[in-house]
Image (spheres, rainbow, N blue to C red):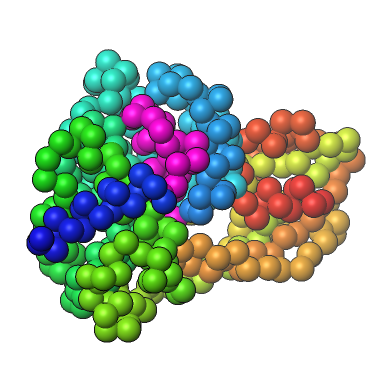
């Protein structure tokens, strides 16, 4: 039996008996639900996604419902999940599905990649899980499974090597009966990476591939995958004007549609305390109270945030933003640190 055939058959059999079957986006071939879950699961743990997925499906049960919503409404429901470009692209893709495809998702991975925010792996996941298309996915979990199984030690920081691994993955799919086998296989390879073939403490003896896994035979599963390129991190310092007006209003400003926290509502932000002070009427400046600074970590950047409180007796018109009542701001799309500040008070 060839290694590729053994790989696919072993995973399909394992998934049916030992794989995950209780996730809310499983046991369906609704491309809307699968697509929504795949976008949410990018860079985010399953435990976090569960609740958000449920809320989204309740508020927007179909792609047409999502398309009919405003971007602010979508960002508000997404608030706290992070990586907000996913939510903006989610909304754009829903608009395109409705406008260009009659509210019906394309059935091929190639066509799905034409939608905003859907890359090759996400498109393959939707097409294989929902339509049985024989296309390979290559997310982080799958890269780990494949490189360990094959002993593939080429540096995945190279796009050439990643393309090679993708081509290899395409040869390791089930050979037949794709409408039945591809959904199970695709779920299996994701589940294996999430539950057994984990980054730090893989449960190799429990793996259905252990007998033919190169990394396990070498006793070096943590050697794979190889990726030497490191993220270049940067840092920025921002001063946040935390202005409140009696009885219960806070000053919020919508961020530009590009850059950090694009499209979200945040406290007015400044590059320095001096620029914050200069933006305020002279009468307000003596009332400012600096709070303890804290760090918020993004994927490529550390944000050093310096809240500066200002309490006013009443809301006064200002070009720095809009006064939003306490009953209304929880529904807005807010960056996680801003939401935490406002919630903890």
Q: Is residue 34 magenta?
A: yes
In the displayed structure, 175 sits above or below 60; it is below
272 above or below 187?
Answer: below
Q: Is residue 324 visible?
A: yes
Image coordinates of residue 238 in percent, x first then y, are: 61, 63
Which image quadrant for residue 194?
bottom left
Residue at far top of view: 102
x then y, percent, for residue 102: 27, 15
- Of the pair 320 and 169, the residue shown nearer to us: 169
Residue 49 versus residue 97 in the image, above or below = below
**Quadrant into which the N terminus falls:** bottom left
Residue 308 forms part of the magenta stretch: no
| Residue occupying image coordinates x 70% and y 36% | 329
Q: In this view, does 244 lie to the left or right of 134?
A: right
In the rendered view, does 154 fall on the left or right side of 56?
left
What residue is at 80 percent from the left and 44 percent from the top?
A: 244
Which of 306 and 26 lies nearest the eye of the viewer? 26
Magenta residue span: 19-43
In the image, 77 versus 123, the foreground residue is 123
């Amino acid at each position: 039996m060839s290694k590729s055939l053994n790989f696919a058959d072993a995973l399909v059999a394992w998934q049916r008996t030992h794989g995950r079957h209780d996730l809310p986006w499983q046991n369906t071939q609704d491309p809307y639900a699968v697509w929504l879950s795949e976008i949410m699961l990018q860079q985010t743990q399953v435990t976090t996604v569960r609740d958000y997925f449920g809320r989204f499906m309740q508020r927007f049960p179909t792609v047409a419902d999502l398309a009919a919503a405003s971007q602010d409404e979508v960002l508000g429901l997404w608030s706290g999940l992070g990586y907000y470009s996913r939510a903006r692209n989610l909304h754009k893709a829903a608009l395109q599905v409705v406008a260009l495809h009659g509210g019906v998702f394309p059935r091929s991975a190639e066509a799905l990649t034409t939608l905003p925010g859907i890359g090759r792996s996400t498109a393959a996941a939707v097409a294989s899980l929902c339509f049985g298309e024989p296309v390979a996915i290559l997310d982080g979990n799958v890269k780990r499974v494949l490189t360990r199984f094959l002993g593939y030690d080429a540096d995945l920081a190279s796009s050439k090597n990643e393309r090679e691994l993708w081509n290899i993955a395409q040869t390791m799919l089930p050979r037949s009966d794709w409408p039945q086998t591809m959904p199970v296989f695709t779920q299996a390879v994701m589940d294996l990476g999430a539950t057994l073939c984990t980054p730090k403490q893989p449960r190799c003896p429990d793996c259905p591939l252990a007998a033919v896994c190169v990394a396990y035979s070498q006793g070096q599963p943590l050697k794979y995958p190889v990726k030497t390129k490191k993220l270049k991190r940067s840092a920025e310092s921002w001063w946040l004007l935390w202005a409140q007006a009696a009885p219960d209003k806070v000053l919020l400003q919508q961020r530009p549609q590009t850059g950090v926290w694009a499209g979200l509502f945040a406290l007015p932000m400044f590059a320095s305390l001096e620029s914050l002070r200069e933006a305020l009427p002279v009468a307000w400046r003596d009332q400012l109270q600096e709070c303890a600074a804290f760090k918020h970590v993004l994927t490529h950047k550390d944000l050093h945030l310096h809240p500066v409180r200002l309490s006013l007796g009443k809301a006064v018109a200002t070009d720095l933003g809009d006064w939003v009542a306490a009953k209304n701001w929880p529904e807005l799309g807010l960056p996680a640190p801003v939401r935490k500040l406002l919630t903890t008070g």
